[in-house]
Image (tube, rainbow, N blue to C red):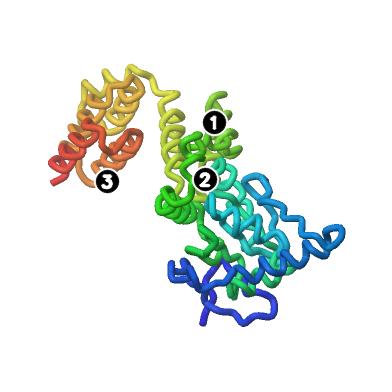
Amino acid sequence: MTQPPGSAPRSGAQSAQPSPAMSASLAGAVDLSSLKQRAEAASQQQAPGGQQTGAPPSAGGAVIDVTESSFQSDVVERSMQQLVVVDLWAEWCGPCKQLGPLLDKLANEANGAWVLAKVDVDANPRIAQLFGAQSIPTVVAIAGGQPVDAFSGALPEPEIRKWLNSLLDALRDKLPGVKAAEEAGGQVEAEEPEDPRFTEAEAAFERGDFAEAEAAYQRILDEEPANTEAKAALNQVRFAARTESIDPAVIETSNADPADATAAMSAADVEVARQQPEAAFARLIAAIRVNAGETKDELRNHLVELFELFDPADERVVKARRDLASALF
């Protein structure tokens, strides 16, 4: 069976195709009590006079490192109050280094709605064996002392957020810690840390260096083609650069000759910059009606670029799109 991207087989284990999300039937199939027995035995050996320490679950933070001896208190007992997400990882695992920091960030954002328990499988092999992990990273959600769901591989952030939110929705009324964290503001959308790539682009834009701003936003899109924020910003930068040197008198030139495509496009840019998009759209559509061939296509493309500066649901854009369709056909 082929292994999916983003996961690495455990050392000494055969490569297998892990399920992207193990079903809830996993609950009850894993007996976590075996680690409790080992933890109790270890604590008896370590405590003076052979007495068990009986330490309660540590307060910890959003992210904790868990061992076989602390698994019972830090994972099982803690999961009676809040969702615990166990991250099975290893130092040699490349995908783990991608997933780990992302899980850390999400756990810190949650402010107590759930806790991330990180387990080094090389140092704690029994925990990995307990869950039957055939590849890493493997992430297991624990609630009420039992596994409830899991996934393997370095999934993208949106998928992990969706997975976590669905778990919290299902467990909100069952784990008191989830609701308590939310009531205390734990689930209020955390302010996103500033992305240095956007900071660089915005600084260039503010100082009027449109070429550098465009290059900075383009680098973001080269890395993340689906980044809608960068795409929208890039459109704004290109528009600002284009309109910077346009003489507003071009509006009179275009009025005098509506068929002049070059004048119409420049005049429309000036009108959009002046917050007069309806006039700009109407000007270009009028020019489209009286031109043909490549010139007509150039006018249409310019109009579509202007549309992208606005919300697609903007009534002015919706109307102009209808008028454009009428002019073209």
Tell me the SS state at disc 3. helix
Give the percent coordinates (x, y) of residue 69. 73, 62
Q: Is residue 183 visible?
A: yes
Total marks drawn? 3
Q: Identify which residue, 31 or 164, lies in the foreground.
A: 31
Indicate which label's residue lies in the foreground, 1 or 3.
1
What residue do we see at 72% from left, 55% from top? 54
- Toward which corner of the image does residue 137 lie, by quadrant? bottom right
Circles 2 and 1 in contact, beta carbons < 8 Å: no
Q: Which residue is mark 2?
A: 177
Task: Work out whether residue 99 or residue 128 is closer to the camera in this orientation and state it.
Answer: 128
Q: CA distance from mark 1 to mark 3?
A: 35 Å
Residue at 15% in and 37% down = 323
Percent of width and height locating residue 113: 52, 45
According to the picture, the residue beneath numbered tag 1 turns out to be 202
Name the residue nearer the viewer: 321 or 196: 196
Q: Real-space Cα distance between discs 2 and 1?
A: 40 Å
Q: Earlier in the sequence, mark 3 or mark 2?
A: 2
* Residue 159 position in % (x across, y down): 46, 56
SS for dot 1: helix
Q: Amino acid at mark 1?
A: Glu
- Who comes first in sequence, dot 1 or dot 3? 1
**Mark 3 or 2, closer to the camera:** 2
Q: Within 10 Å of the Cα at label 2, are there few (<14), some (14-19), or many (20+) other Cα atoms?
A: many
Q: Is residue 212 something one can see in this rendering?
A: no
- Mark 3 lies on residue: 294
Bin the neighbour count of mark 1 within 10 Å (Cα to Cα): few under 14, some 14-19, many 20 and up. many
When the figure is inspected, residue 290 is found, relative to residue 224, above or below; the finding is above
Mark before the other along the chain sequence, 2 or 1: 2
